[in-house]
Every structure is written in structure tokens, then in C-alpha cells.
Amino acid sequence: MGSDLRLAQYGAGRRTCPGKALGFATVVFWVGTLLHEFEWVNGSESDPVDMSEKLRLSCEMANPLMVKARPRR
């Protein structure tokens, strides 16, 4: 019912991971840097992006997104 924390990556409560805040800050920094430094273009420009999903351990795209990264000038 949403309260089973065995699969929570950082734990919860008193035993939460002490590096949780640093991990989140690092991920936000790197994603922001990638978005700022590159222009992201659909890899198959003729096909629209398929947003259909399939449920596994987490929700995944049925057809993975293929992109090309072009450096910004």
C-alpha cells in the first residue's frame, strides 16, 4: 500500500542515507549541465516520439528514446 520501504534506494526514517542530499544535488547539477551545454534532437527525426509505457520494476518507455546531442556554440 505504498508503505513498504524495502526497495527505497535511500531508506527512510532514522536510517536514511546520509548522502541522500548530496546525491540529489549532484544529479540535478549534471542534468542541468547536460541540458545547458547540448542541444538535444530526436534521433529519428521522421518518427514522432512514442510515449507508450510498459510496467516492470519501474515504469519504462516501450520504445526507448533515441536522441542526438549537438554541442551548443
Image (spheres, rainbow, N blue to C red):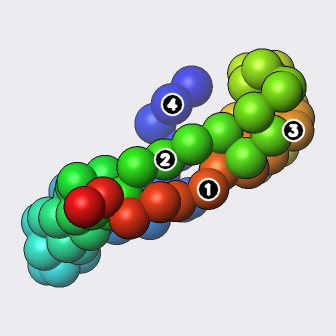
Q: Earlier in the sequence, mark 2 or mark 1?
A: 2
Secondary structure of residue under mark 1 = strand
> What's the residue type where badge 3 is placed?
Asn
Q: Earlier in the sequence, mark 2 or mark 3?
A: 2
| Circle 1 residue | 68
Q: Are the residues flagged by discs 1 and 3 in contact, CB closer than 8 Å?
A: no
Q: Earlier in the sequence, mark 2 or mark 4?
A: 4
Q: Which mark is residue 63?
A: 3
Asked whether residue 58 is in view, the answer is no
Q: Are the residues flagged by discs 4 and 1 in contact, CB closer than 8 Å?
A: no
| Circle 4 residue | 2
Task: For marks 4 and 1, give the CA distance.
Answer: 37 Å
Instruction: Look at the image and tell me in which quarter the N terminus lies.
Output: top right
Q: Are the residues flagged by discs 2 and 1 in contact, CB closer than 8 Å?
A: yes
Give me the residue at 87% from left, 38% from top: 63
- Mark 3, residues whose alpha carbon is within 10 Å: few (<14), some, or many (≥20)? few
Q: Are the residues flagged by discs 2 and 4 in contact, CB closer than 8 Å?
A: no
Point out the frontmost of discs 2 and 4: 2
> What's the residue type where badge 1 is placed?
Lys
